[in-house]
Image (cartoon, rainbow, N blue to C red):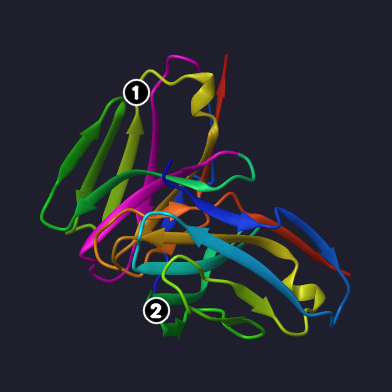
Amino acid sequence: SQQGEEDPQALSIQEGENATMNCSYKTSINNLQWYRQNSGRGLVHLILIRSNEREKHSGRLRVTLDTSKKSSSLLITASRAADTASYFCALGDDMRFGAGTRLTVKP
Amino acid sequence: EAQVTQNPRYLITVTGKKLTVTCSQNMNHEYMSWYRQDPGLGLRQIYYSMNVEVTDKGDVPEGYKVSRKEKRNFPLILESPSPNQTSLYFCASSSSRRRTEAFFGQGTRLTVV
């Protein structure tokens, strides 16, 4: 079974900038989810995107899914210090997680 | 408040001493699962349960047991813990296995010495 591969592993930006992180996978999936984890705490669901969807928005979050390239991206616009966390993609109904992207937003 | 509750939050134990980590959800969810999180490896699924009395192995089930006698509870049992089971453990639940968001507990940090 496959795991998502997030890229980059770590990202450091200034408050107000946009943050983009990517998730790639190898075999077809029917949905993909993004989760956030604050240091050592439980994961919080952000967005679920289905294989027949190309883009979804939730507040400052924008998720895209390109099934031809087998990749998804999570964009956080106008980032805040409170967005500092690790972000994970989870693949399919089995929810296979990758190692995550650690985002640091500097005030 | 909808939540998944794990206990204990922190546990230090010795090799071979049986332990149980409890997990309870108050959302009447059918699907529950256990993950372990290790640096650089992300979350790996240990066991999952589709409903009461229905459990199945995930990717890393060795050394673990689970049971699902009631819908709300899904305990994780380590019969004979070893140091390689030192990890951060998460319980999660969702209304079904398919295409729904999962709710996670706050985690249990286990150290086996």
Is residue B29 shown above or below B15?
above
Residue B23: % across, % down: 56, 63
Q: Please identify, in this view, whether the residue under mark 1 or under mark 2 is nearer the observer.
A: 2
Q: Nearer the viewer, residue B113 or B19?
A: B19
Quadrant, the C terminus of chain A: top right
Q: Mark 1 points at which residue?
A: A77
Amino acid beneath label 1: Thr
Front-most of residues B47 and B73: B73
> Where does the magenta region start and end?
A14-38
Do circles 1 and 2 both sit on a common chain? no
Left or right: residue B17 versus residue A40 is: right
What is the quadrant of the N terminus of chain A in the image?
Answer: bottom left
Residue farthest along the front direction in this orientation: B70
- Asked whether residue A23 is drawn in magenta, I would say yes
Looking at the rendered structure, the secondary structure element under dot 2 is: loop
Residue B37 x %, y %: 61, 61
Chain letter for mark 2: B
Alpha carbon separation for disc pair 1 and 2: 42 Å
Q: What is the three-letter code of the residue carrying label 2?
A: Val
Residue A96 sits above or below residue A59 on the image: below
